[in-house]
């Protein structure tokens, strides 16, 4: 039923990276007035975090690639539309 | 000769397919339909929020400044860590460790409680200031989006509680852990949504 089990040290590393990226997002939020650059950076970080959770915590890395593409497409479309709305403002 | 070649081909064909064979989705397939439906609903709301903001940037930015960004960031760390715990629980049960699985899930459940508590404090602060759904467009979105998500956290905690009880009784094994993966997938989705919700509502301006 199952093939490989993800090593715990690897999962822990992913968790630490997620924590670090969250702190980066928070510090961008704290650093006064933001702009397009900050907005894009924060959305990009969300995309990377989403991929890490989907692939390594949800385990989509082990299933058909279509599911990974679906989650990636979700973040690209939702994030892209948020960025577009920001630029229109 | 030709028949022989055909036979050889027909036997050879499945081999590469087997080599790239992948596992099915973790957990019950039905939960994935639910996850996609929920993500779609939230995704639409996220985009609607962004376009609503584009019509009144000053109001959104001024209202956002009243939010407790620190609380939002702490809750992000709480959910990410709970997701990690749930992941470790799924790894434990794949190795047949029922009690360890229940323990990791118990940790995730407690962190869910921390998230809910922090969110309640945030809501209480806002209500004390007289802020409601009708105060302005930003607060309407802030309160409804985060409350919609809040309800998913509560639902996730109920699911986790059932799985913890069953895991503790030894109801799952290294061969039968679909239930754990189903609950885990739902919990990860709750985390995934907050990963967009936090920067969108608390950070981007």
Image (cartoon, coloured by chain):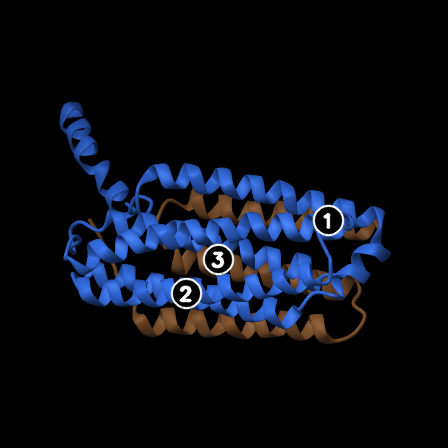
Chain colours: A brown, B blue
Q: Left of A79 or right of it: where is A67?
A: left
Q: CA distance from mark 1 to mark 2?
A: 28 Å
Q: Are marks 2 and 3 in contact (CB under 8 Å)?
A: yes
**Residue at screen point 30% across, 69% down:** A7
Examine the rendered structure and indicate whether residue B107 appears above or below residue B39.
below
Which picture quadrant has residue A30?
Answer: bottom right
Examine the rendered structure and indicate whether residue B79 appears above or below residue A74.
below
Q: Please tell me which residue lies in front, A65 or A10.
A: A10
Q: Position of residue B24 (x, y in %)?
A: 30, 43
- The circle drawn on residue B82 is 2
Q: Left of A9 or right of it: where is B63?
A: right
Q: CA distance from mark 2 to mark 3?
A: 8 Å
- The circle drawn on residue B50 is 1
Task: Give SS at disc 2.
Answer: helix
Q: Please tell me which residue lies in front, B94 or B119.
A: B119
Q: Position of residue B10 (x, y in %)?
A: 19, 31
**Residue at screen point 25% across, 47% down:** B178
Examine the rendered structure and indicate whether residue B36 appears above or below residue B125.
above
**Residue at screen point 75% across, 46% down:** B134
Quadrant location of the C terminus of chain B? bottom right
């Amino acid at each position: 039923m199952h093939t490989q089990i993800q090593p715990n040290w690897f999962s822990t590393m992913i968790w630490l990276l997620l924590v670090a990226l969250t702190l980066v997002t928070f510090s961008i939020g704290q650093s006064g007035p933001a702009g397009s650059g900050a907005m894009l950076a924060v959305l990009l970080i969300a995309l990377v975090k989403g991929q890490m959770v989907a692939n390594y915590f949800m385990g989509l890395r082990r299933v058909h690639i279509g599911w990974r593409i679906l989650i990636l497409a979700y973040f690209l479309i939702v994030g892209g539309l948020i960025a577009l709305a920001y630029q229109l403002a | 000769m030709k028949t022989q070649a055909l036979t050889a081909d027909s036997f050879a064909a499945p081999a590469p397919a087997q080599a790239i064979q992948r596992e099915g989705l973790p957990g019950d397939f039905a939960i994935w339909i639910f996850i996609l439906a929920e993500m779609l609903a939230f995704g639409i709301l996220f985009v609607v929020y962004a376009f609503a903001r584009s019509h009144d940037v000053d109001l959104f930015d001024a209202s956002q400044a009243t939010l407790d960004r620190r609380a939002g960031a702490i809750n992000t760390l709480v959910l990410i860590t709970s997701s990690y715990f749930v992941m470790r629980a799924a790894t434990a049960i794949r190795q047949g460790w029922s009690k360890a699985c229940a323990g990791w899930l118990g940790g995730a459940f407690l962190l869910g409680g921390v998230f809910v508590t922090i969110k309640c404090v945030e809501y209480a602060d806002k209500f004390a200031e007289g802020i409601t759904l009708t105060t302005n467009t930003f607060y309407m979105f802030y309160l409804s989006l985060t409350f919609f998500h809040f309800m998913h956290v509560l639902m996730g905690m109920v699911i986790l509680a059932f799985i913890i009880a069953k895991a503790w009784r030894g109801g799952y094994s290294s061969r039968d852990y679909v239930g754990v993966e189903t609950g885990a997938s739902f919990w990860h989705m709750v985390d995934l949504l907050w990963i967009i919700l936090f920067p969108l509502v608390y950070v981007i301006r």
